[in-house]
Image (cartoon, rainbow, N blue to C red):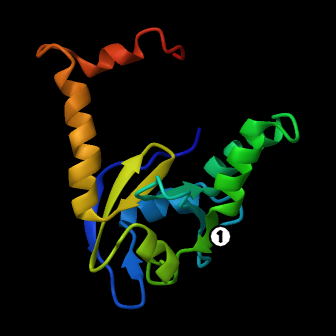
Amino acid sequence: MGRRFRGESHHKVDSKGRVSIPASFRRVLEASDPNWQPGDAPELVIVYGDHRRQYLECYTMEAIEEVDAKIAALPRGSKGRKILERIFNGQSLPTTVDETGRLVLPAKLRQKIDLDKEAFFIASGDTFQIWKPETYEEVEMAEAEKLMDELPDDFDPLEFLDGAGGA
């Protein structure tokens, strides 16, 4: 397992769709790109998915290769493989970080998530997500609060790790 993304931040999006990636996220992209060398632009894959997905999910090269390997292990022609290939191969965009640490988000992707002048970045382990800030607040935060409200007040989230395996 490679380095993990951590944290969240807001960044301005210019009229050409350029948005700075948090510096700590860039370090993870570099460390998780087997072809990256100092001075090179790290590669990543942005998965935008279908109409139900309201955010862009950015995969490191290591993370997307892991997903690709799992998809390839599914029976050719199976429903699961077809769906996953459509999402991760068809509804995705391979890209790089530019020399100033920015992503250029094409108009199609900005329009898909209704992104205008500001983007919200949030870490999700070996991926990170880009949201329209208002959508994140309305959708994702509401869902997280709903899930937490179902738990007792003294619940320790680390209990989810019990029995998860590992060291």
Q: Who is closer to the viewer here, 23 or 158?
A: 158
Nearest to the observer: residue 103 or residue 139: 139
Q: Where is residue 84 in the image (x, y as percent from the top left)?
A: 69, 46
Q: Nearer the viewer, residue 19 or 31?
A: 19
- Which residue occupies the extreme bottom position in the image? 15
Q: Which residue lies furthest to the right in this view?
A: 76
- Where 70 sits versus 34, above or below? above
Q: Which of 118 and 134 is in front in this view?
A: 134
Q: How many labels does the image show?
A: 1
Residue 83 seen in the figure:
yes
Q: Can residue 70 be seen in this view?
A: no
Other residues around mark 1 within 10 Å, as few (<14) / some (14–19) / many (≥20): few
**90 vs 98: above or below:** above
For the point 28% across and 55% down, which residue is it?
Answer: 8
Task: Name the residue furthest left.
Answer: 153
Name the image quarter holding residue 142. Answer: top left
Q: Which residue is drawn at 49% across and 50% down?
A: 127
Looking at the rendered image, the quarter that the N terminus falls into is top right
Say which residue appears at 42% left-offset and 60% top-offset.
Answer: 25
Give amino acid for label 1.
Gln
Query: Residue at 46% of width from left, 45% of height from top?
Result: 4
Task: For mark 1, give the secondary structure.
Answer: loop
- Identify the image quadrant of residue 77: top right
Q: Which residue was labeled with disc 1?
A: 37
Left or right of 98? Residue 73 is right
Q: Is residue 135 left or right of residue 76?
A: left
| Residue 91: percent from left, percent from top | 63, 62
Residue 3 % position (x, y): 51, 46
Instruction: Say if 21 sits above or below 49 in the image.
Output: below
Where in the figure is residue 68, as x and y percent of width and height? Answer: 74, 47
